[in-house]
Amino acid sequence: CDSTSKSDSVFHRAPSAREVVSTRLPHRTVTMETQHEASYQKQGAVFENKKRALGKKPQRFVRNVGLGIKTPKEAIEGSYIDKKCPFTGDVSIRGRILKGVVISTKMNRTLVIRRDYLHFVRKYRRFEKRHTTLAAHVSPAFRVKEGDVVTVGECRPLAKTVCFNVLSVEPCREGNSAAAKKTFRLF
């Protein structure tokens, strides 16, 4: 028994997270890119345990937000799961629709936008420049950089400071996005 070495014996190692591509059932193919949280991520409106779903592409719940806003292609064809997304989640857009410049994308799926406006001072009969910032949830369907102009819509509170959701993105036209986010722009 002493002559056995590590090379002769059979070691079974557990597969890594990258190697595990699908779940137990063959018709439920869930890639590990969508499963990045501690709990199992799924869309609430999709029943995943159908018995006759072999060979069909996986179902996806997609909604039209309305208000003349087009659903992005990534939301329809993508595989991400985000319950706070207005296109694939359970968040409805109601209330105000605002535009602003992205000044920070450092938070996870949340960005900070800057809105510039003019305030009239009656004493001097002049306008002064002012700005305000607000946090908005950004869906994985969008690729957003600092300096981009985004349209956000009001929704229910998603976090302590987040009550808006990104609906569309206009890429930054200027080459220097750092200078673009500080310039004064009216929308």
Image (tube, helix red, strand yellow):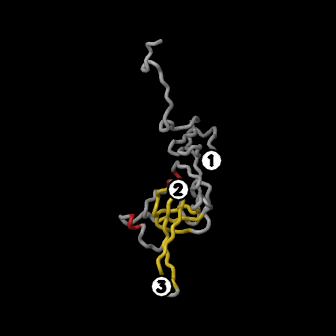
Kindly identify which residue carries mark 3: 126
Are discs 3 and 2 less than 8 Å apart at CB?
no
Q: Whole-percent x and y of residue 78?
A: 51, 50
Q: Is residue 123 above or below residue 173?
A: below
Q: Are marks 1 and 2 in contact (CB under 8 Å)?
A: no
Q: What separation in Å lies between label 3 and label 1 (alpha carbons)? A: 56 Å
Q: Under tag 1, what secondary structure?
A: loop
- Distance in Å between CA atoms under marks 3 and 2: 40 Å
Q: Mark number for residue 139?
A: 2
Indicate which disc, 3 or 1, sits on the residue closer to the N terminus. Answer: 1
Front one among 101 and 62:
101
Q: Is residue 173 left or right of residue 111?
A: left
The answer to whether residue 177 is left or right of residue 113 is left
Locate residue 106, reporting x and y percent: 47, 57
Residue that numbered label 1 is attached to: 46
Q: How many C-alpha atoms fall within 10 Å of the one at disc 2: few (<14), some, or many (≥20)?
A: many
Rendered view: 57 above or below 15: below
In front here: 143 or 76? 143
Q: Residue 162: x, y in percent?
A: 57, 61
Of tags 1 and 2, which is closer to the observer?
2
Q: Is residue 148 left or right of residue 52?
A: left
Which numbered dot is residue 84? Answer: none
Q: Position of residue 155 (x, y in %)?
A: 60, 62
Q: Is residue 163 above or below residue 7?
A: below
Amino acid under disc 1: Val
Going from N to C along the chain, the mark reached first, 3 or 2, is 3
x 43%, y 61%: residue? 146
Q: Quick one: SS at disc 2?
A: loop
